[in-house]
Amino acid sequence: MNSECDRFSRTSPAGIRSWIIMELVSLGAFVNAYLRAPLSPGGAAPPLSLSHAPTLLAGLFVVHYLNRGLISPLRTPSRSKSHVMVAGMAVLFNICNGSLMGAYLSSPAARAFLADALARPRFLAGVALWAAGFAGNVAHDEILLNIRRKARKGKATATATATAEA
């Protein structure tokens, strides 16, 4: 039984395409806000050097969203369809999320707070924790992809066997 809001509706975009759009919107909004620096006097963009702590954090955000929004979905064999309302709400959330994070990291308040961050052990431990989490995420994505590939291969084998028997 199909309803107006189920995942089999004609208004459901393809899963991988909708995931990429939903996630890359955040990246675009973030980069736009970070470079425009709307909370800085005169909109002065922050230095684009990894020795500048806010830019380092911005770089980590970009790496995370490139993986989450582009690399991971393109490696996925398939994804379930998303209803257009789900995709739309995710786009709205990600525009807000990316814009707010980019605006804050480029702000004078973030620059002041992170002024000596690269010399603080807690900040460096946080970056190391991010790296460990990112590596774990990538490793476990690979495990899940292998499970999906084996399941898909098993279905293909079962279908071929059933066809041969018929």
Image: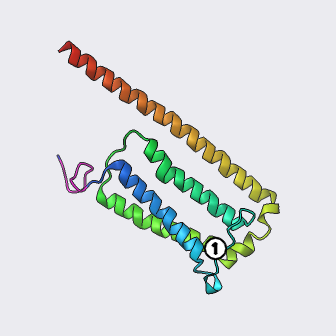
**Residue ID at (64%, 73%):** 106
Q: Residue 127: where, in percent of width, then height?
A: 70, 54
Q: Tag count in the figure? A: 1
Badge 1 marks a residue whose secondary structure is loop
**Residue ID at (44%, 47%):** 73
Q: Residue 159: where, in percent of width, then height?
A: 26, 23
Front in this rendered view, residue 164 or 154 = 164
Left or right, 149 with respect to 4, comes to right
Q: Is residue 4 magenta?
A: yes
Viewport quadrant of the C terminus: top left
Left or right, 53 with respect to 93, comes to right
Label 1 sits on what residue type?
Ser
Q: Residue 53: where, in percent of width, then height?
A: 72, 65
Left or right, 9 with respect to 89, comes to left
Most distant residue in the front direction: 48
**Residue ID at (35%, 49%):** 15
Most distant residue in the top direction: 165
**Residue 88 drawn above or below residue 37:** above
Front in this rendered view, residue 21 or 127 = 21
Colour logic: rainbow
Q: Quadrant of residue 30?
A: bottom right
Q: Quadrant of residue 117?
A: bottom right
Q: Is residue 39 magenta?
A: no
Q: Where are the magenta residues, as a range?
A: 2-11
**Residue 89 drawn above or below residue 40:** above
Badge 1 local density, few (<14 within 10 Å), some, or many (20+)?
many
According to the picture, the residue beneath numbered tag 1 turns out to be 106
| Chief secondary structure of the magenta portion | loop
**Residue ID at (71%, 62%):** 50
Q: Residue 57: where, in percent of width, then height?
A: 66, 62
Left or right, 111 with respect to 142, comes to right
